[in-house]
Image (cartoon, grey):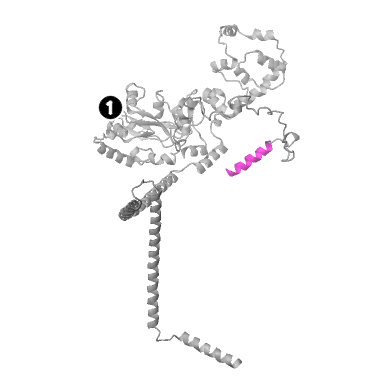
């Protein structure tokens, strides 16, 4: 590349050459074409500032005077569509060279082969695509899977809803029944309270709603009633038990005629024991 | 690629600085932690709370209080969470009315196939690929007055728009561009100045794959036979007579389509266009040709 040649040109530590490069507002093409052989010949020349100024043409001088743009050397070059200096490392990079080629074409001196990825990069690219890029068939398969999953989910949901809807009439019936019983219980409670209130007023005479006598009367009556209820329940239970027992006894009496074999063997054992004791004594 | 990681780590190790006194660190716990600093040294006096006032007495107003102003947190209502907003694709809306206007004012050449490049080159519509925009969405506004016969390629359409274009004897294709391709498509000059080969367009990602394989959306990956059936069906649905484009003078223009890998008409992936030299460079190497054609 031309870039490497330019670097070689600036690098040698010959002060005269560097002086010349700095003094003239450089024509890039000249520098780029400047080979190492030329540099060595330049070194032998004795260049004074006067000599150098004499080289300039009148036209150059006029152009210098006419130019009032105040642009720096870099921008001036850009305006004249000349090649930029290679003064930074990044200007030797592949990307910069590509851009330079895009801008200047073949005049940039860039080898167009570097515009494409090299073999290693291409290999990496192909491998990357193989691993991470979705394929046509893979996409189709994925979409099919998604759709079947969605359909299956919907189906199960519908099934669940159908099952629940089948239960619905019985549940509604239950709900109404529950509400009815609750209402009944509520009404009974209210009636009971009203009755107790009435009784309290009959007992003590008319009094306030918040009277403590009324409250104690009602609470004691309620307690008594609850106790009575409990006793009644216990009696009923005992009665049931009694009847069961009686039944059992009656059954046993009816089965008394046959003495079970176990009882016979037990009786025999006790008789044997008694005889033994007698013998021992 | 797994081997690359190891290589990278090794190369990193090679470039690491040598162990020296400058980059050694103390062993943990080798230096006792200093506690019990004298109070007077730094914050002994007022403990950073000032001398007087609300700060010193602990009677500062609640956080967010702006001195009887309606506080900021009540002034600006909270925006609800937008799920997957970072994955959504945006399509710039362009109406049929706008398109009609462009055609009538000669901002686009309707005698040639229209695509995203020609629409962006009008300078009226801007597509920003880096902001998750994936092209244009041709909308329905002006569907009743649209009367141009065109061959257009867009990224998103509705059924009515397809009907409005096909009724006038035109054709429409929906086409996906991945982001690098889209960057080239919306600004070709800038792309050619980069001096890199024209990318080959990848197939659409899974979330929009179905859209571009569906004949109803005139997707570019759909079966052409299914597309012709869908054209007939749509004509019957909307009640218009489908013009026979095979007998049309413009048949060649109307039937022009890009390859799924191709992003510019007349330019294949892998080619390089140089505007300065006015040349097209094509790769010759077997591997490169294979890669860009696959």
Q: Where is residue A118 in the image (x, y as percent from the top left)?
A: 56, 35
Q: In this view, does A234 lie to the left or right of A85?
A: left
Residue B105 percent across, percent down from the top left? 33, 21
Residue B60, visible in the rendered structure: yes
Which residues make up the magenta segment?
B1-15
Please give the chain letter of the residue carrying mark 1: B
Whether A236 is among the magenta residues is no
Judging by the rendered image, the residue that carries numbered circle 1 is: B145
Q: Position of residue B240 (x, y in %)?
A: 24, 34
Q: Is residue B198 above or below residue A137?
A: above
x%, y% of residue A120?
57, 38
Q: What element carries label 1?
A: loop
Residue at point 56%, 23% (across, down): A108
User: Mark 1, residues whose alpha carbon is within 10 Å: few (<14), some, or many (≥20)?
Assistant: few
Quarter assignment of residue A241: bottom left
Residue reaching furthest to the bottom = A279
């Amino acid at each position: 590349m031309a870039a490497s040649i330019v670097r070689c040109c600036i690098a040698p530590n010959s002060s005269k050459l560097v002086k010349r490069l700095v003094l003239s507002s450089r024509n890039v093409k000249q520098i780029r074409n400047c080979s190492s052989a030329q540099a060595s010949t330049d070194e032998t020349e004795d260049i004074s500032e006067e000599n150098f100024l004499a080289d300039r043409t009148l036209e150059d001088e006029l152009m210098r005077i006419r130019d009032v743009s105040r642009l720096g050397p870099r921008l001036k070059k850009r305006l004249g569509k000349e090649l930029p200096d290679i003064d930074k490392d990044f200007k030797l990079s592949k990307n910069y060279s590509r851009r330079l080629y895009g801008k200047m074409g073949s005049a940039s001196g860039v080898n167009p082969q570097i515009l494409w990825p090299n073999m290693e990069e291409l290999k990496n690219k192909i491998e990357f695509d193989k691993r991470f890029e979705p394929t046509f068939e893979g996409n189709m398969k994925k979409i099919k899977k998604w759709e079947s999953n969605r359909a299956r989910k919907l189906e199960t949901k519908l099934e669940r809803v159908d099952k629940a809807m089948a239960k619905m009439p019985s549940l509604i019936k239950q709900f109404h029944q529950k509400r009815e019983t609750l209402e009944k219980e509520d009404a009974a409670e209210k009636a009971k309270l009203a009755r107790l209130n009435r009784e309290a007023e009959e007992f003590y005479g008319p009094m306030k709603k918040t009277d403590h006598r009324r409250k104690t009367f009602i609470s004691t009556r309620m307690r008594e009633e609850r106790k009575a209820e409990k006793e009644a329940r216990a009696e009923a239970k005992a009665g049931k038990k009694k009847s069961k027992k009686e039944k059992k006894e009656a059954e046993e009496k009816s089965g008394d005629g046959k003495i079970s074999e176990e009882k016979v063997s037990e009786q025999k054992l006790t008789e044997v024991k008694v005889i033994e004791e007698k013998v021992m004594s | 690629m797994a081997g690359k990681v190891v290589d990278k780590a090794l190369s990193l190790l090679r470039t690491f600085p040598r162990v020296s006194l400058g980059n050694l660190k103390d062993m943990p716990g080798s230096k006792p932690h200093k506690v019990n600093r004298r109070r007077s040294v730094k914050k002994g006096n007022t403990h950073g709370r000032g001398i007087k006032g609300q700060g010193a007495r602990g009677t500062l107003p609640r956080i967010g209080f702006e001195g009887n102003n309606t506080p900021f947190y009540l002034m600006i209502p909270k925006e609800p969470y937008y799920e997957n907003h970072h994955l959504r694709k945006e399509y710039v809306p362009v109406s049929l009315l706008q398109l009609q206007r462009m055609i009538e004012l000669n901002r686009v050449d309707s005698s040639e196939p229209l695509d995203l490049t020609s629409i962006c080159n009008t300078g009226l519509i801007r597509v920003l690929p880096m902001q998750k925009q994936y092209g244009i969405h041709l909308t329905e506004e002006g569907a009743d007055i649209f009367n141009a016969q065109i061959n257009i390629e867009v990224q998103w359409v509705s059924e009515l728009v397809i009907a409005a274009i096909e009724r006038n004897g035109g054709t429409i294709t929906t086409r996906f561009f991945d982001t690098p391709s889209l960057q080239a498509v919306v600004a070709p000059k800038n792309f050619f100045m980069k001096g890199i080969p024209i990318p080959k367009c990848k197939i659409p990602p899974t979330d929009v794959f179905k859209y571009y394989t569906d004949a109803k959306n005139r997707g570019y990956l759909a079966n052409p036979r299914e597309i012709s059936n869908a054209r007939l069906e749509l004509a019957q649905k909307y009640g218009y007579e489908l013009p026979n484009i095979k007998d049309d003078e413009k048949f060649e223009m109307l039937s022009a389509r890009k390859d799924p890998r191709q992003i510019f008409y007349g330019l294949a992936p892998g080619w390089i266009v140089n505007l300065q030299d006015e040349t097209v460079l094509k790769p010759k190497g077997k591997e490169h040709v294979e890669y860009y054609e696959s």
